[in-house]
Image: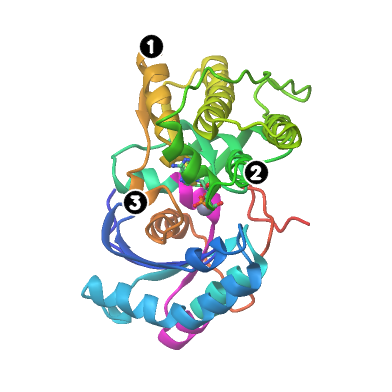
Amino acid sequence: MRIFMKILGIESSCDETAAAVVEDGRKVLSNVIATSLEEHKLYGGVVPEIASRRHAESISAVVSEALENAACTMDDIDAVAVTYAPGLIGSLLVGVNFAKGLSLATDTPLVPVHHLRGHIASNYLTSDIEPPFLCLVVSGGHSHIVAVKSYTEFEVVGRTRDDAAGEALDKAGRTMGLAYPGGVSIDKISADGNADAFKFPVPKVSTSPYDYSFSGLKTVVINLVHNAEQKGETINTADLAASFQKAVVGCLLTNLEKAAKDFGYTEIVIAGGVSANSLLRSEAQKMCKNNGWTLNIPELKYCGDNAAMIASQGYFEYLDGTVADESLNAYATMPIESSERSE
Ligand code: KG4
Ligand code: ZN
């Protein structure tokens, strides 16, 4: 059943201040993103204090613009959905507090949304896909294989035991002297590199066949670069980036393929910032074609952090009866499965 509803989404978990209006969880009416990325580039990574300050400065204008672009006022909005976990606590609090104030002032229901659930929902914005499906969620902070049982029921099948894929790409990129975010730089420079120039080991993880480990691969890069520096040798950065990217993508897809086969999923979905990676996208396509599976990856504009995905997931959470009051808090960590607070 289609229930006509407009949701205002607000996202501020990292360095993007974003607001969007989405109808029925799928139709994007507006999608506004302000980012403090350029400032963080100076430091080679996100500086939480700077991110929070920029959120506080821009959130009001970003939300106004999202409403205006959607030709809406708060009278047209059925619920305000906000990312409340996980993420940088100071950043999250800006969005949560703004959303609480707006909800209270306009008597509009407030819906808390888990950031990774939002990333998964970014696929609903550009495709008609419906759960159940198996989703690889790969971002700067997480690498999960998630069984998406319904719009609001999730089970983590595999996870990284150390670095997230995006985190490993960012750190390796930094070691190679590439601009932040390293994942984006590695993707770009790899186009000119030989992906077979450097051999990377296949990480062994004892916890589960679906779990990941990326810190060992990252250490290989660090050691190669430092050894070369000590010997006064130069390394071909494009070759190293391409080889490292191939190793990371290989790990991501090997476990995803195994999980899909073992659990009998034929609908495969990829989400999160790293889903923008060109090799991951093309290799996932091949994997799914070989197995006769369907693949969904968000459009590039919805891969990174945005509020349309939060509004989309907010719609499904709201239909499921999830509403918060003014006691809603933000949490740096939170399992995707539960709405319970994690320590
Ligand atoms: O989902 P996201 O925007 O923020 C978090 O929730 O963490 O993901 C950011 C991550 C960063 O690690 C960034 O390097 C990575 O996504 N990323 C990429 C690409 N675009 C963004 N990694 C590889 N290739 C890309 N094209
Ligand atoms: Zn994200």
Counting other residues with Cα less than 10 Å from the Cα at mark 1, is it few (<14), some (14-19), or many (20 or more)? few
**Is 182 above or below relative to 205?**
below
N-terminal label among 2 and 3: 2
N-terminal label among 2 and 1: 2
Q: Which residue is found at the position 64% from the left and 64% from the top?
A: 88
> Separation of disc 2 and disc 1 at Cα?
35 Å
Q: Residue furthest left?
A: 71
* Residue 315 seen by the camera: yes
**Which labelled disc corresponds to residue 271?**
none
Residue denoted by label 1: 290
Q: Which residue is found at the position 44% from the left and 54% from the top?
A: 313
| Residue 171 located left or right of residue 230 | left
Report the mark closest to the observer, 2 or 3: 2
Residue denoted by label 2: 175
> In this figure, what is the number of numbered marks?
3
Residue 123, position as x, y percentages in the image: 37, 43
Front in this rendered view, residue 295 or 193:
193
Residue 169, position as x, y percentages in the image: 58, 40
| Residue 204 located left or right of residue 290 | right
The reply to whether the magenta stretch includes residue 98 is: no
Q: Amino acid at mark 3?
A: Lys
* Prevalent SS, magenta region: helix
Query: Which range is magenta?
Result: 100-120
Residue 248, position as x, y percentages in the image: 58, 29
* Residue 132 seen by the camera: no
> Separation of disc 3 and disc 1 at Cα?
27 Å
Q: Quadrant of residue 209?
A: top right
N-terminal label among 3 and 1: 1
Q: Residue furthest bottom?
A: 105
Q: Amino acid at mark 2?
A: Thr
Q: Amino acid at mark 1?
A: Asn
Residue denoted by label 3: 301
